[in-house]
């Protein structure tokens, strides 16, 4: 009885891997852009702190800090948006591979 169950298990072909089991190429561009934005913000904050102790370069360092903080925040936001768009694209591709027969609904054109 045991040998017949082992024989039936060995004779079955292995199932092809599911879409979720395949190693997917990860796109880390959004994370790198966000990290660059955080570094820019940190540098701008440091320049603002230094500007209060260095009166000779006060104006330059203050302007640099005030300008680069919003630019850093913009980079962080853009990186996060890019990451979300990549996730949406990956999920859409996986859904299309799981159910390839499903098509877009036919909407009547007017």
Image: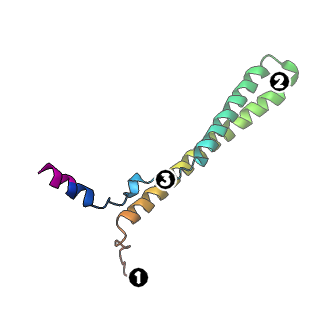
- Residue bearing mark 2: 58
Q: Which residue extends farthest top?
A: 53
Front residue of 6 and 22: 6
Residue 40 drawn at (x, y percent): 70, 35
> Going by the image, does 32 lie left or right of 11?
right
Q: Which residues are magenta?
A: 1-6
- Residue bearing mark 3: 24
Label 3 crowding class (10 Å Cα cut-off): few <14, some 14-19, many 20+? few
Residue 72 drawn at (x, y percent): 66, 38
Residue 85 drawn at (x, y percent): 52, 54
In the rendered structure, find residue 109 and report the number of the disc placed on it.
Answer: 1
Q: Nearer the observer, disc 3 or disc 2?
A: 3
> Going by the image, does 75 lie left or right of 58?
left
- Could you tell me which residue is drawn at 37 percent across and 81 percent down? 108
Q: Which residue extends farthest right?
A: 56
The quadrant holding residue 77 is top right
Image quadrant where one finds the C terminus? bottom left
User: Mark 2 vs mark 1: which is more N-terminal?
Assistant: 2
Magenta part, dominant SS: helix
- Could you tell me which residue is drawn at 41 percent across and 59 percent down? 94
User: Mark 3 vs mark 1: which is more N-terminal?
Assistant: 3
Residue 88 located within the stretch drawn in magenta? no
């Amino acid at each position: 009885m045991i040998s017949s169950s082992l024989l039936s298990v060995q004779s079955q072909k292995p199932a092809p891997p599911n879409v979720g089991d395949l190693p997917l190429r990860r796109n880390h561009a959004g994370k790198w852009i966000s990290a660059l934005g955080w570094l820019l913000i940190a540098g701008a904050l440091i320049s603002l702190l230094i500007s209060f102790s260095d009166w000779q370069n006060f104006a330059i360092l203050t302007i640099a800090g005030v300008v680069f903080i919003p630019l850093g925040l913009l980079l962080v936001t853009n990186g996060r948006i890019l990451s979300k768009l990549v996730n949406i694209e990956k999920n859409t591709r996986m859904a299309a591979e799981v159910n390839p027969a499903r098509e877009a609904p036919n909407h009547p054109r007017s």
